[in-house]
Amino acid sequence: MKTTNPNFARLMLVATAFWVATSPVSSAAEAPVNAAKPKPVDPTLQGEEIAVLTQPPFVPPPITRRHATKVIVHLEVQEVVKRLADGVDYLFWTFGGDVPGSFIRVREGDLVEFHLANHPSSKMPHNIDLHAVTGPGGGAASSFTAPGHESQFSFKAINPGLYVYHCATAPVGLHVANGMYGLILVEPENGLPPVDREYYVMQGDFYTTGRFGEEGLQPFDQRKAEDERPSYVVFNGSVGALVGDNALKAKVGESVRLFVGNGGPNLVSSFHVIGEIFDRVYQEGGIRPSQEQVQTTLVPAGGSVIVEFGLEVPGTYILVDHSLFRAFNKGALGMLKVEGEDNLLVYSGKEVDAVYLGRQAEAGTDAQRRVVELEAARAAAITADPKIASLTKEIQIERGKGVFMQTCFVCHQMEGQGIPGQIPPLAKADYLMEDRDRSIRIVLQGMTGEVVVNEKKYNGVMLPMNNLSDAEIANVLTYVRNSFGNQGDAIAPDEVRRVRAELPVVNTPAFE
Ligand SMILES: [Cu+2]
């Protein structure tokens, strides 16, 4: 039976697939751009088509053709703020707008013409390393793409299997931690055995300054990433991405194939479906079933697995990383809802217990979403009140004084007077007062090079202080802007958060 998916059509990124009768491989004479490097003609290729890409949890339809072709893949990198959990946003870097990136499906022997675009609104250059590519860097060197640009390279899919792709731009760990990974399936020449449903699930670990569930736009935390202490471990890019209304669906009697990836960047997944046994496991994403009747299978970081199972009994099956604190406390939990007739010969019992699922069961409910909206509205109403605003500023100044006395005064001195010729003053400092965002950036990023403050030149080094929280930076700047003869306004933690998010590498010492 063919894979049938009712939601499939509306999720296609590129719904067109077409054939061109003429030879797909242009000769050197027809393509003057490549004149210097004539491409050899591949006699095995017939025709040309545009790849159908899908967003998770959906998978493009199985390939039915029995010959190789030229497949054109268009993938666009987008840097987008999206939900990581209820009330928690994160600036994701994505292949195709989602985490994980769009699913790519080609056939063994195909020539893949890859177009990687980087949206003009991106702040960072990106590239792609496909583990399906045979060649240095897996395409990374040929696909380095600045914002607003597009790169093109081609590769022959000579190895069938389920492969991870990811960004490999330095610092690689950061790009992958921000969500830059996905799966490409190279189907074997004769295809995979038919099943009723196929889905795409990919695990990833996320490192935010705030703890799990701490609200607001959360910046990346370099130290937690180095220590491999994620705040979130999730399937398909967010807590609850496969829960409730977003659960995977199937019916009793059907067979299901999951293409499971692990983007990491750090953790290995112990992938398990509570209440099911994998009839077949294609270990590590290889193309032959290598094991049968498996309970839990390892998915390496930067690796994958294919699992297949039949469904005998209706109910809700829970997908987890069986490292259980990840599942129940950090988000690595999804659901497969199976409808159909009870089969009392196989199982009789009550539905999945809500207590067992804990807080994950409620993720994504309307009530929770509403509470987040109301809390945001309340916070906005409070800050809009001028009396509260001025009291807030007084509190910030007092708190900021504490930060200054711990952190800044050693160099800038007690009265902010600085040290002549070495440390610029903050007292009555024109440079400080000129530009709010710049002063935030100086604390986050540090400062070097020549600077003129109150008509005197300085050329020293101030180290970044990005280990201070948004609130601490807002408070210390509010303090200096309202002390030592300066007359200024308050700087809100939200401004610091915004500036920090605009500088995604700020927490990341350059690795190159
Ligand atoms: Cu990247």
Image (cartoon, rainbow, N blue to C red):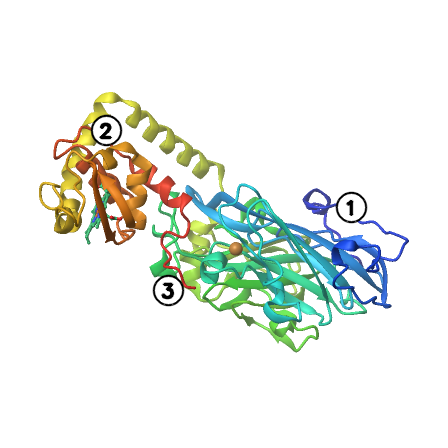
Label 2 amino acid? Asp
Mark-to-mark CA distance, 3 and 2: 37 Å
N-terminal of the pair, mark 1 or mark 2, is: 1
Where is the N terminus found, in terms of image quarters? bottom right
Q: Are marks 3 and 1 in contact (CB under 8 Å)?
A: no
Residue 332 placed where, x, y %? 48, 58
Q: With 292 as the anchor, is 377 left or right in this view?
A: left
Which class describes the residues within 10 Å of circle 1: few (<14), some (14-19), or many (20+)? few
Observer-nearest residue: 379 or 67? 67
N-terminal of the pair, mark 3 or mark 1, is: 1
Observer-nearest residue: 235 or 152? 152
Which class describes the residues within 10 Å of circle 3: few (<14), some (14-19), or many (20+)? few
Observer-nearest residue: 461 or 117? 461
Residue 16 shows which numbered tag? 1
Q: Are marks 3 and 2 in contact (CB under 8 Å)?
A: no
Let me know if residue 253 appears in the view. no
Q: Nearer the viewer, mark 1 or mark 2?
A: 2
Identify the residue under disc 3: 226
Label 3 amino acid? Glu
Residue 500 placed where, x, y %? 36, 45
Residue 95 placed where, x, y %? 59, 52
Is label 2 in a helix, a strand or a loop?
A: loop
